[in-house]
Amino acid sequence: MTQLRSLWRSVLPFAVVFVALAGVREVNAQSDELELSATLDGNYANGVAITGGTWEVSDPEAGISMVFSATGLVDVNQFEFILTFEPLAAFDIDSARFRPFVSDDFTVEFDTPGRGVEVMDDDRLRLGAGVFESLVNGDTELGTLTLTTSATFDPNESARILVDFFSVGPAADDRDSHDETALGSMGVTVAAATAVESATWGSVKGKPLER
């Protein structure tokens, strides 16, 4: 663990690769024009995806989960990703936890210090993990992020979690880094805003005057 904490402080083990497992691309379009996966052009991964979870909620202080995975990993032992919350007030990011993936046979065993997350100065969330006794290749789940909506969460207002950044590789100074340009509109819609006001305005505006 001493080595792990040291690597964490040096930003070594952070990146969340989101595996595009079978069937992900069939469901990657969302109502708010967000995508659940992205194809990557790099040396250490060819895809990242959100492959599971329960992120659509309608109540304050409700649990949210997101399972991240990646495809085409080549000699990887660390990953990191950064998330943005819109609006920030809809979420309790201090409740966030990241549980790294460990396979049943321990052939893949990611680890991370503490809660596995860091709230950045600009209120974005950094999370990730690393493997320190082996290298990971192929397709694999990376881990699960959990958090809750805030006490003031309003399901009638749009709320989203966006993936801003992802990096992955075998060393802190040897990683592929992908920003929002490469990732596209990747993220999840937690709540979709309703258009009640515009519909009501239209009906009132078009109503004939009574004489």
Image: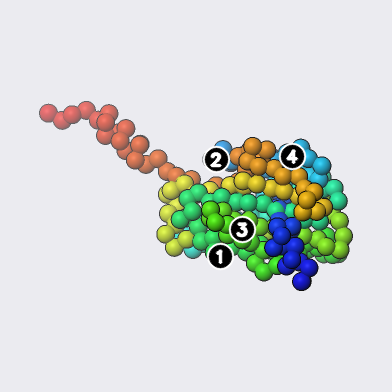
Is the Cβ of the residue at disc 4 closer than 8 Å to that at disc 1? no
Q: Residues within 10 Å of mark 2 (few under 14, many from 20)?
A: few
Q: Which mark is residue 40?
A: 4
Asked whether residue 195 appears in the rendered view, the answer is yes
Q: Secondary structure at mark 2?
A: loop
Q: Residue 190, can we see it?
A: no
Camera-near label (4 vs 3) is 4
Q: Residue at x 86, y 51 (%)?
A: 75
Alpha-carbon span between mark 4 and mark 1: 30 Å
Amino acid identity at mark 1: Ser
Which circle's residue, 4 or 3, is located before the other in the chain? 4
Name which residue lies at 63% across and 51% down: 82
| Residue 46 quadrant | top right
User: From mark 2 to mark 4, how far is it between C-alphas?
Assistant: 23 Å
Residue projecting furthest to the bottom: 2
Residue wearing tag 3: 65
As drawn, the label of residue 31 is 2
The amino acid marked with disc number 4 is: Leu
Residue nearer the viewer, 114 or 193: 114
Circles 1 and 2 in contact, beta carbons < 8 Å: no
Name the residue rendered at 74%, 66% in the picture: 6
Q: Position of residue 135 (x, y in %)?
A: 86, 56
- Quarter of the rendering occupied by the C terminus: top left
Residue placed under numbered mark 1 in the picture: 95
Give the answer, above or below, for where 44 lies relative to 136. above
Q: Nearer the viewer, mark 1 or mark 3?
A: 1
Which residue reaches farthest left?
Answer: 211
Q: Of marks 1 and 2, which one's residue comes earlier in the chain?
A: 2
Please report whichever mark, 2 or 3, sits nearer to the chain's N-terminal start: 2
Q: Tag 1 or tag 4, which sits nearer the N-term?
A: 4
Amino acid, disc 2: Ser
Across and down, in percent, residue 33 comes to: 56, 38
